[in-house]
Image: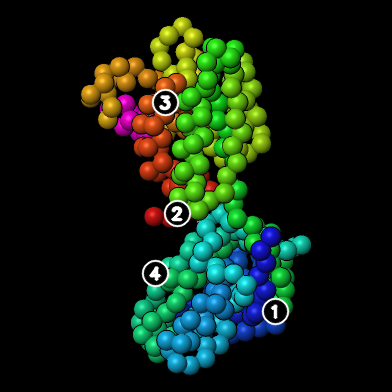
């Protein structure tokens, strides 16, 4: 487990000004008590690594004091700009969740920008929201926890579950997930289930996913209009919100050349804090659907967790 040490904690009463080091800060559910940036929003607490500050010192040809970039917490031990939204920093009391990497510079209202003509905070500073409050001071250690995304992949097939043939569509889903998470430098774990076309077993797995706070559920199979195609009929009543545009766009895109694609009843939606996508049961359909879903998947994850990141 990676750790960072707190080199300084800093506060300012006004936005866009240099923050002053203090002995301790109190982290509340609004942010840093007494700080200008505290409030019911996602950028409650700003952090900047001394590794970033040292690089900037070479450019500015002077030493930079903690808080000059308006960061609440100055750290050492990790290049913070390489973290991601939804990663967390903790100790025995405090829990901070990363909500944003970098920001728009205040420009002429930024004290250090006016002096040097540049500011490292928009590129390498990070912002967090407070999940668990507490007291923080210089010398304390925080543990870094990259977000582990949990995915449930469910293949519905009487014949594949009976061992009559290999489940190629479920395997392809897992392969494409591995590629996507790797490209986005994110950690993930897949819970894989191969079940017969049984509505009760599907419903049980969907309830299990909701209870265990699975991030993403992807099913393959049972989205057509045959007698044994019931996946959308089981899934739709369990959704809190449907996301119709995704599947509509996919059907229209591929249905222009392959009219049979318009027979798919695939659905997408939100079940609690879980994103759900039901895909047809062929490898080709898995490729086509996930290519489109991946274009907006990270944005959907952020929206679901209250992060307005564009």
Q: Earlier in the sequence, mark 2 or mark 4?
A: 4
Q: Which residue is mark 1?
A: 138
Q: Does residue 264 appear to the left or right of 142 in the view shown?
A: left
Q: Are marks 4 and 1 in contact (CB under 8 Å)?
A: no
Highlighted range, magenta: 245-252
Q: Earlier in the sequence, mark 4 or mark 1?
A: 4
For the residues labelled 3 and 1, the Cα–Cα distance comes to 54 Å
For the residues labelled 2 and 3, the Cα–Cα distance comes to 34 Å
Q: Which residue is mark 3?
A: 283
SS label for mark 3 = helix
Task: Work out whether residue 39 can be spotted.
Answer: no
**Looking at the picture, how far across and down is residue 179, in whole percent?**
46, 43
Q: Which residue is mark 4?
A: 104
**Looking at the picture, how far across and down is residue 292, in whole percent?**
36, 37
What residue do we see at 57% from left, 49% from top?
A: 187
Q: Which residue is mark 2?
A: 308
For the residues labelled 4 and 3, the Cα–Cα distance comes to 43 Å
**Secondary structure that dominates the magenta span:** helix
Viewer-side label of 2, 3: 3
């Amino acid at each position: 487990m990676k750790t960072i040490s707190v080199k300084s904690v800093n506060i300012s009463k006004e936005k866009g000004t240099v923050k002053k080091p203090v002995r301790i800060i109190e982290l509340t559910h609004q942010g840093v008590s007494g700080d200008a940036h505290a409030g019911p929003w996602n950028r409650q607490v700003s952090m900047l690594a001394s590794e970033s500050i040292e690089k900037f010192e070479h450019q500015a040809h002077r030493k930079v004091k903690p808080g000059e970039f308006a960061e609440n917490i100055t750290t050492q031990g990790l290049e913070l700009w390489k973290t991601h939204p939804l990663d967390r920093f903790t100790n025995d009391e405090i829990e901070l969740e990363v909500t944003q990497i970098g920001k728009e510079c205040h420009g002429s209202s930024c004290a250090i920008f006016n002096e040097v003509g540049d500011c490292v905070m928009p590129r390498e500073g990070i912002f967090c929201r407070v999940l668990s409050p507490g007291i923080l001071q210089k010398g304390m250690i925080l543990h870094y926890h990259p977000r582990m995304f949990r995915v449930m992949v469910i293949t519905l097939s009487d014949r594949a579950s009976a061992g009559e043939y290999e489940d190629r569509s479920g395997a392809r889903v897992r392969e494409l997930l591995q590629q996507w998470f790797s490209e986005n430098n994110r950690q993930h774990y897949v819970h894989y289930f191969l079940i017969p076309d049984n509505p009760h077993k599907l419903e049980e797995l969907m309830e299990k996913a909701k209870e265990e706070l699975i991030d993403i559920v992807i099913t393959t199979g049972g989205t057509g209009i045959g007698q044994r195609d019931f996946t959308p009929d089981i899934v739709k009543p369990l959704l809190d919100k449907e996301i119709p545009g995704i599947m509509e766009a996919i059907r229209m895109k591929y249905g222009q050349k392959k009219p049979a694609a318009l027979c798919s009843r695939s659905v997408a939606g939100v079940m609690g804090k879980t994103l759900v996508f039901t895909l047809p049961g062929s490898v080709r359909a898995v490729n086509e659907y996930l290519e489109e879903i991946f274009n907006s998947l990270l944005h959907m994850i952020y929206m679901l967790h209250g992060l307005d990141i564009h």
